Image (cartoon, rainbow, N blue to C red):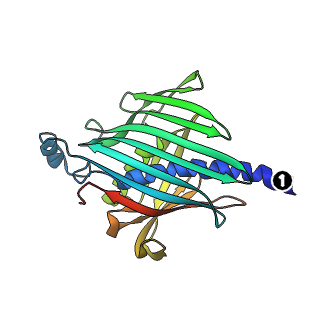
Amino acid sequence: MMGLFARVSKRIAMKVLGLASMLASMLASILVLTHSAYATESEAQKLSLQTPEQCSRSGDYDIYLSGIHTGTMSRTETWSGKSAVVTSNSQASILGIGTQYQQKAELVWSNESREWITEKFHQKVTGFRARDMQASFSDNGRVSKVEVDGDVERYSSDDTALRDVDTLAIQIREYLLQGRQQFRLIRQASDAIEPYQFYVQKPLTKKISHFGELSLIPVKQTGSEEVTYYFAPELDYQLIQARYHGIILHGLIELNRYSSTCKEG
């Protein structure tokens, strides 16, 4: 029985770290500049004539596995106008099995298709299932070149941009602010492209330990990973919480600290 639990725990530990990276992205979705791509076309044209605003935002999350604190995640976004560099670091451990995750992603607003697209990212995982991954994107995000530990693969999509987790999160936030109730996005994984469907749920009120009682909007993700994200409109649509729905164990990430030098809008 302990052998089975250890094997399951290894898989779940990686899922939680994968969730950390996915959620890392979600924080990025909240950390968009005050004058972001959610403006109208005329406003976007005006913004292009202005000096890019530069600022940074950062936050820390706690990672839990079935109620047990197993790790932490930190993220920093450095913004310049309608482009950003996002760095994230996370680590988790269960039954002595540890994994560390680092990623640096560069993203930009596409005037061609009016969406956030990934330009490139570098991801490094050490410990369990270690890898070194670099990816670059072309054709307005529809084509990617991915190198993992020296092996190169190419991927493409006809109608939907391929994104890293950070850019994907920003696009989710945009759709949420636009009032979209469901949408489809594709994440570039290390050895495949993963399509996800998202469904916006009814708002609810929840007490969050570090922030008190908040009104939250749940967004449910289905596909190869089932996750529910909780955004707080009164905190500029910050991602407060995310839950990974596993078959045996369940993952949770919750925001515990947030700081910003950017204007709220």
Judge by depth and name the residue closer to the eye, 63 or 106.
63
Residue 155 percent coordinates (x, y): 51, 28
Q: Name the residue under label 1.
A: 4
For mark 1, give the secondary structure: helix
Q: In which quarter of the image is residue 216?
A: bottom left
Q: Is residue 126 shown above or below 231?
A: above
Residue 112 percent coordinates (x, y): 27, 35
Judge by depth and name the residue closer to the eye, 20 or 71.
71
Residue 224 percent coordinates (x, y): 61, 48
Q: Is residue 220 shown above or below 148?
A: below
Quadrant containing the C terminus is: bottom left
Whether residue 184 appears in this view of the structure is: yes
> What residue appears at the point 50 percent right and 46 percent down from the top-left corner?
89
> What residue appears at the point 26 percent right and 42 percent down from the top-left corner?
82
Whether residue 197 appears in this view of the structure is: no
Q: Is residue 105 left or right of residue 124?
A: left
Quadrant containing the N terminus is: bottom right
Q: Is residue 188 shown above or below 176?
A: above
Residue 206 percent coordinates (x, y): 47, 76
How many marks overall?
1
Q: What residue type is labelled 1?
A: Leu
Q: Is residue 47 left or right of residue 239?
A: left
> What residue appears at the point 32 percent right and 63 percent down from the top-left corner?
236
Q: Residue furthest right?
A: 1
Q: Label 1: few (<14), some or many (≥20) within 10 Å?
A: few
